[in-house]
Image (cartoon, rainbow, N blue to C red):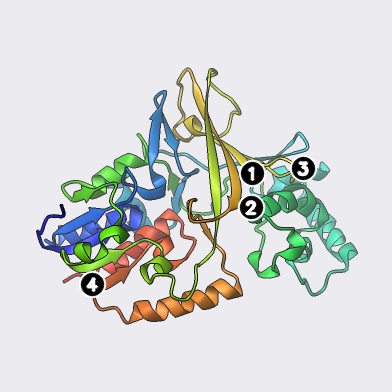
Amino acid sequence: MIAEKKYDYLVVGAGLFGAVFAHEATKKGKTCLVIDKRNHAGGNIYCDEVEGINVHRYGAHIFHTNDKRLWDYVNSFVEFNRYTNSPLAIYKDELYNLPFNMNTFYQLWKVRKPEEVRAIIQSQIKESGIEDPQNLEEQAISLVGTDIYYKLIKGYTEKQWGRNCRDLPAFIIKRLPMRFTFDNNYFNDKYQGIPIGGYNKLTEGLLKGIEVRLNVDYFESREEWDAMADQIVFTGKIDQFYDYRFGKLEYRSLEFKHETLDTDNYQGNAVVNYTEREIPYTRIIEHKHFEFGTQDKTVITYEYPQEWDESKEPYYPINDEKNTAMLKNYQQLADTETKVIFGGRLAEYKYYDMHQVIASALKKSSTIA
């Protein structure tokens, strides 16, 4: 039985966008009801505690931003540690540092000077003879040469997208950042870290004192839920909101296989990418390293990209011409709504980092009178 209490906002989805919006609306004296179809709040940043380790159930999440306002905002709910993302890549049992930097180039070619690196890359680009890249493979080679492409990009990208790089459009890779310094910090942002005690603390802080109902499918009783609030904040799939009127937007999905191991340290790093096409997973995450854990056991997660269907989680939007055209049709409908606010990666069909989701929710909630 759905209660008949009237709320200012019904927030559909307790992920980061929904939680930030509800928090800000509540601060302004508005009443919010947050509902989510999952059995937990937090969306994809949710963590399970296993052997005292915070396990990122839906893949590695590393917060990073250049915006001090956003950094201060998240730290007002939970203190963040100083974790710095420095992934490794394995290709045919050889280890390489990421992102592409002087350490990587030394590992590839045993050169130590930036000018030597530039000369090697330029020579490989020239030798390829590619002047007008027609696909992702040609685009990547025209940017970084053949060695980096074949060892560190090709297999990984083909696993991610489930297609040969020659069949993927060039625009997927607009640029490939290369650093000519010995710097393994993956992000260029000024601030980065992981919440001490896990992301659930951030979610709990945002939703403190706000009514949240879990295991609720909005679409099963849509009219009843809509009648409960003056406005709806919708963070689910925009095409589903409109009953797939123009067709289904497409995604890539992921499957995660978690394993608890009877060792205190499996790979010595939080993120290790496997760039060979023949190895089915793209990376192994060892969660304890996000929080510098010293537990007796460890939890690792294998990440397998896969085709998406209704039974799987939608992770990465496929921004090709077909889906972009379909999205425009849905956005035109959304623009006519006076009582619905759309936000978050599913409602906007956009790949968002966490700080971008928070910024979007703060912006959209700033108009609340």
Q: Which of marks 3 and 1 is nearer the N terminus?
A: 3
Residue behind mark 2: 160
Query: What percent of the width, then of the height, locates residue 245?
Result: 43, 75
- Neighbour tally class for label 3: few under 14, some 14-19, many 20 plus, Cα within 10 Å: some
In the displayed structure, does residue 210 sit left or right of residue 93?
Answer: left
* Disc nearest the viewer among 3 and 1: 1
Which residue is depicted at the point 42% across and 62% down? 346
Instruction: Verify CB contact (< 8 Å) between mark 1 and mark 4.
Output: no
Residue pointed to by mark 3 = 106
Residue 285 percent across, percent down from the top left: 55, 36
Which residue: 28% across, 54% down?
19
163 is higher (above) or lower (below) than 74: below
Q: Which residue is label 1 attached to?
A: 282
- Kindly report the distance in space between the C-alpha atoms of the residues bearing marks 2 and 1: 7 Å
Reading the chain from its start, which is encountered first: label 3 or label 2? 3
Q: Nearer the viewer, mark 3 or mark 4?
A: 4
Q: In this view, does 34 lie to the left or right of 355?
A: left
Q: Which amino acid does label 3 sit on?
A: Tyr
- The amino acid at mark 2 is Gln
Assign a secondary structure to mark 3.
helix
In which quadrant of the rendered view does residue 142 lie? bottom right
Residue at numbered disc 4? 367
Q: What element carries label 1?
A: loop
Query: Circle 4 sits in a helix, a strand or a loop, which is it?
Result: loop
Tell us which disc is closer to us: 4 or 2. Answer: 2
Q: Are marks 2 and 1 in contact (CB under 8 Å)?
A: yes
Marks 3 & 1, CB-CB < 8 Å contact: no
Compare marks 2 and 1 and give the one earlier in the sequence: 2
Give the numbered dot on residue 196. none
